Amino acid sequence: MAEKKEIVEEKNKKERRRIIRILEVILSLLLLLLIYLLYLYYQFLVGKGPGIAEKGRAEVKPLIYMMSIYGTGGRDTPLFNRPNGVALDGERIYVADTGNNRVCVFDREGRFLFSFGGLGVAKGKVGESLSWRPGKFHYPYGIDVSDEGNIYVADTLNWRVQVFNKKGKPLFWFPQADEGEQAQVYPLGIDVYRNRVYVVDGYKKRVAVFSLEGKYLFSLGEKGELAGMLRGPLSVAVGKDDVVYITGKLNLDLAAYQPIGKIFWVRGRPVKNNEDRFFGLPAGVAVDGKGYIYVVDAFSFDIKIFNPRGELLATVGKRGEDALEFNFARGIKAYKNMLAVADMENDRIQIFKVDWEELKKIEEKFK
């Protein structure tokens, strides 16, 4: 009996050891599967998923808030860092993520598609190592997209405009060093309109105009402190009848230039000390599909809306972090009845829809 009992116990021990080995194998396989799933997640989903967008609906006539985009949701750099520029077309939203030296591209629902860039220095201090190559940025500021889908980026501290195809592949940059002093720019705001590229030159205090291929054509504006002259220009947009609108941070104005370069009208003026200001700091300007003009005012924390005659129709916004609130916003772009605002210090992009019927009602009061 004792011998049989020992045999049974030995069999039970062997069975327990066999079950434990099986469980160890199963746990090992499960662990490997988990590691593989995590690999797939980080390899294919993180940074290529929906991005960080917050949708909602709020309205301060005539603007209707649609959503905010805060970043890509990627593994390494998930959030924007002080974005200065934004653009949009019928399919996509393009963000100059200035602090991260990159461009991020989203669909119109705020889903992240891809990004490109990274720090590259072309103009540095004496003895500083230069690391620039096509596709790298040093403080990308303004951004716009052509009708063909090419992306134009003001690579500000590298003193050039870089051009990419719709997939983010570098195509060319301008102006080249051999094009002469007149063509050289310190680019800030940028607007691609029809077959021309309008670039705010912060160094020469002008708007330099190039072809889509980067050939220098002519300049608009004259440096000075008189009405409509350019002193600290920041942003440019072209509207109906090829009128060019330029904002200035030192003259604190919005100037409308006729295509021949003659000043059409001016809103705002330089101020001293604590004088009343029309603008706090007119940072960005955009023109929508009906010709209405939008100026994002960084120091007044609002958007001022004008008709093509320069009449102020509405002011929307205040300082804050909620929808239709801003914190030192910089860039603004329009596409048909959609607006995108680079809300810089809130590290986000706000998207709005314009109620054209409401704007028309407001405008009729001026007639």
Image: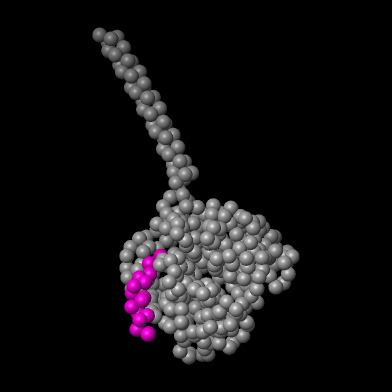
Q: Is 236 in the magenta?
A: no
Total marks in image: 0
Percent x, y for residue 193? 54, 67
The furthest residue to the left: 1
- In the image, 8 versus 193, the foreground residue is 193
For the point 39% across and 24% down, which residue is it? 21
Percent x, y for residue 176? 70, 64
- In the image, 126 versus 252, the foreground residue is 252
* 228 is higher (above) or lower (below) than 46: below
Q: How is the image coloured?
A: one colour
Relative placement, left or right, of 207 versus 313 is right
Percent x, y for residue 332? 47, 70
For the point 43% across and 50% down, which residue is it? 49
**Do we see residue 340 in this rendering?**
no
- In the image, 348 versus 2, the foreground residue is 348
* 161 is higher (above) or lower (below) than 328: above
Q: Quadrant of residue 315 in the image?
A: bottom left
Q: Quadrant of residue 66 in the image?
A: bottom left
Percent x, y for residue 178? 74, 65
Q: Is 362 in the magenta?
A: yes
* 77 is higher (above) or lower (below) than 60: above
The furthest residue to the front: 241
> Which quarter of the image is occupied by the N terminus?
top left
> Which quarter of the image is occupied by the C terminus?
bottom left
For the point 51% across and 68% down, which residue is it? 84
Relative placement, left or right, of 138 versus 10 is right
**Do we see residue 106 in this rendering?**
yes
Relative placement, left or right, of 250 versus 287 is right
Residue interval drawn in magenta:
351-367
For the point 64% across and 75% down, which residue is it? 219
